[in-house]
Amino acid sequence: MRPRQEITELFSTFAQFEADRFSKWVTDAQLRRSMRNCQECSSEISTSEYFWALYWYKQWQEQFTPAQPTNLAGRHLSAYLQELCYWAAQRTEERFRSPRYGVAEYFQMAIAQVNKVLSGFDPKRSSSLKTYAKIAFPSLLKDILRQRREVDICKNWVLLRKVSNRRLVEALQNAGFSATEIARYRLACTCFRALYIQEQPGGVDRLPEPDRELSEAIARLYNKERQTQLTPPGPECSPEMIEQWLARTAALVRTYLYPPVDSLQAPSLDDDTRQDTDLPDPNSGSLLATLIAEEEATARQALRTQMHQVLVAAMEKLDPESQEILRLYYRHGWTQKQIKEEMGISQSTVTRRLSRGREALLAALVQWGQEAVTSQEDVNSFKGSNQVEDMSLALKEWLRVHYSDPEFCSS
């Protein structure tokens, strides 16, 4: 894959695939015009991708709504994250070697999750959007494959029994349902679960297909419960309507948990048919503030590399048992009880080792921070009465990143 260098290209081009491999970059004409107009309007043109990534992220935050998940800023950021998505797709393909999916399919699964990546990104906690996305995309792909393996074999009625209320609501929101519609569909599913119960051995996967009698019972329960559970109660629901609602809900949940893989249709260079939207003013105060923040972030990048080196050295000084406890706790997400049983030690020992290990790492980090201010005069990075609290947050993020992808953390 040829890496993109020029700013306009970074935020306006998309990967095109041939024979399951990257072929070329194709430009979206509207995004290209958008970038050029923003650069022309700015009194202080920045050539930094970090600056424009933060700029479009702020615009995405202001424009995004569940009812309209696609907006101009989101498309710019989707273009920007193409390389990271591609490499995540390639690593997933190499790891799982599925006969059903190739790099292009994995790429499509991941790029469909851009809004989820953006929703999880916090500029105050992560060094850059790229840093966060490099971790997020592989994780999201794993979740999709895990869900897909389950959802793919579930029949509709089994899926509705298994899916959580939170996922069900998210699926309906993702489909653009109103709050009133979501409440009605959710109540219908609640009534379905209450009446569609296990009466024979074999587990939920062996439950038979619902019959007409069950649909009528669900409709009666729904029509009774709507009087107290819904505002407004809405009209009565027939058994036929209940069946339609449940089938539609199952389809939407399946689509949400198991995104459809479509062939990539990159926009044409000459695709000028779409109307330009009103472009945000890149010379606004918020943009200048972003520029300042971006410049400070760039200046601190060297310090972050040093921080990693300091923490790795401090980690190596811990006793092997403490290192293993930290690894099980942060990499595998084990509880203290699970660690106790695995290592054959008391839970109080696990608690003490975790606490002392983190305290030792934090002490090394705070000492390094104080020395960094003195030696590099980077007062803006570490000044203030909240130094220890800030360092504690930095340590928490480092542990999460280090144990989720040690190779990435050291790069």
Image: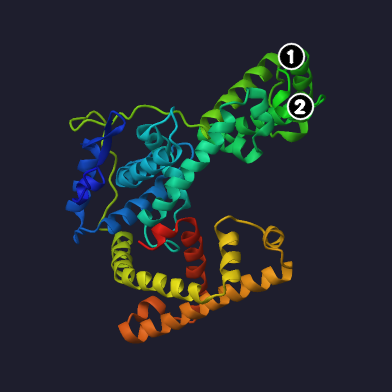
Observer-side mark, 1 or 2, equals 2
Query: In the figure, 235 relative to 406: above or below?
Result: above
Question: Mark 1 falls on what kind of element?
Answer: loop
- Residue 85 visible in the picture: yes
Disc 2: which residue: 202
Q: Nearer the viewer, residue 376 or 86?
A: 86
Q: Quadrant of residue 282?
A: bottom left
Question: Mark 2 falls on what kind of element?
Answer: loop
Q: Which mark is residue 211?
A: 1
Please state the horizontal and vertical placement of residue 265, each as a whole percent of the image.
30, 28
**Is the residue marked by circle 2 packed among few (<14), some (14-19), or many (20+) residues within 10 Å?**
few
Please state the horizontal and vertical placement of residue 205, each as a whole percent of the image.
69, 27
Q: Is residue 45 left or right of residue 134?
A: left
Please state the horizontal and vertical placement of residue 125, each as a whole percent of the image.
45, 63
Q: Amino acid under label 2?
A: Gly
Query: In the figure, 79 relative to 158: above or below?
Result: below
| Residue plotted at (50% across, 64% down) | 399
Query: In the figure, 277 relative to 290: above or below?
Result: above
